[in-house]
Amino acid sequence: MLFHNHLVNIAQILEEETAMAQIRIHVLHCGKIGVAPNLPASAQWRWPAKADARRLKNDARIWLPVSAYLVEHPKGLFLVDAGLPRTVSPTGIEDRAAQLRMFGRGWYTLVHSVVEPGQSIGEQRAARGIRPQDLDYVLFSHLDPDHIAGISEVRGAKRLLVAEEEYFWSCRVNLRYTSRRLWMDEPPERFWYRVNHIGPESRSYDLFGDDSVHLVHVAGHTEGMFATLIRNGDRYVLLNADGAAGPRSWAEGTVPGICENSVRAKKALDWIGEMSRDGACVASLCSHDPDVAPQTIEF
């Protein structure tokens, strides 16, 4: 019995030490996208005509950052999303031909892309002395090109993960606007959400099996998208992917302009808003929020 109690005490000490260890989240801007002003939060169903950028003049677009997150966690080093690669913008300015080659005409009607010098995930990774094999995970919140195109610059990471629902939907339903050739030759490994009490769908994936990082199913914008809930003790950071455009979205209840299912998107947005207003929330970040600058969050 004494030996058993001793083991329990050791386990408790280790758990407390893990909880007290600092977590660092580096917010990276890996390029930017030029879109129609109504796209981030037009609250329309599926494919709103107002989001089509073909008829817009260049100066009528709004330009939004493409965020990825490098996370230093006691259990490992991982990346959430990979942004845009250098090949989409070889000289650091907008390159129409390069975008059409990479993404196809369907995506280009919606989104124009630029990656300024030093901004690609490969360049930012290298600047920090990080090799792909140093990354324990690369987690893709969903398979839209502005979130997964940088996969070419993180190949070699120990594990690349995407939700099974997102993979299925992107391969069989959303064929026009996901550039499958970016990843189909060597697709990310798939994981299954587990039913629990977390998130708007009551489903998540516990990355380390210790409740410190949950990939929370937030369907709506796409079928299988997740938000990343990173906990340290009683505090947490929420990385919302495209579940919201920014704090104004959950303040006004306005879902993203492109939705596979606006009802589920609103449910996800309500959950994001509730979590973001919680006093335990250190930060609630959206992938394309122009008010969020590159920074490091420690908690």
Image (cartoon, rainbow, N blue to C red):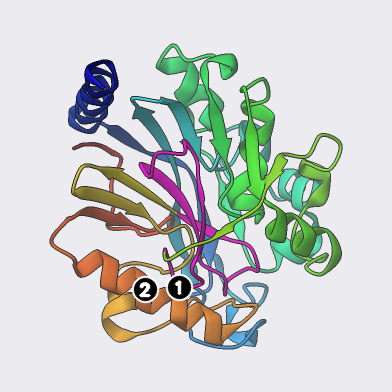
Q: Answer with the quarter of the image where residue 17 lies.
A: top left
> What residue appears at the point 61 percent right and 57 percent down from the top-left corner?
112
Residue 39, percent across and down?
52, 75
Residue 213 falls within the magenta-colored stretch? yes
* Side (left or right) of 107 relative to 211: right
Residue 202, percent across and down?
48, 69
Separation of residues labelled 2 and 1 (CA atoms): 6 Å
> What residue appears at the point 53 percent right and 32 percent down from the top-left corner?
120
Q: Answer with the quarter of the image where residue 88 lies.
A: top right
Look at the numbered disc 1 and give the secondary structure of its residue: loop
> What residue appears at the point 61 percent right and 35 percent down from the top-left corner?
85
Residue 275, percent across and down?
28, 66
* Side (left or right) of 145 relative to 220: right
The answer to whether the residues at label 2 and label 1 have Cβ atoms under 8 Å apart is yes
Residue found at the far left of this picture: 279
Residue 90 showing in the rendered view? no
* Side (left or right) of 209 relative to 299: right
Instruction: Identify residue type, mark 1.
Output: Pro
Please state which of residues 203 and 227 is positioned toward the viewer in this rendering.
203
Density class for disc 2 (Cα within 10 Å; few <14, some 14-19, many ≥20) is: some
Please state which of residues 13 and 283 is positioned toward the viewer in this rendering.
13
Q: Which mark is residue 200?
A: 1
Q: Which mark is residue 271?
A: 2
Instruction: Identify residue type, mark 2.
Output: Trp
Residue 206, percent across and down?
48, 46
Residue 59 falls within the magenta-colored stretch? no
Density class for disc 1 (Cα within 10 Å; few <14, some 14-19, many ≥20) is: many
Residue 198 showing in the rendered view? yes
What segment is highlighted magenta in the picture?
198-227
> Earlier along the polypeptide chain: callout 2 or callout 1?
1
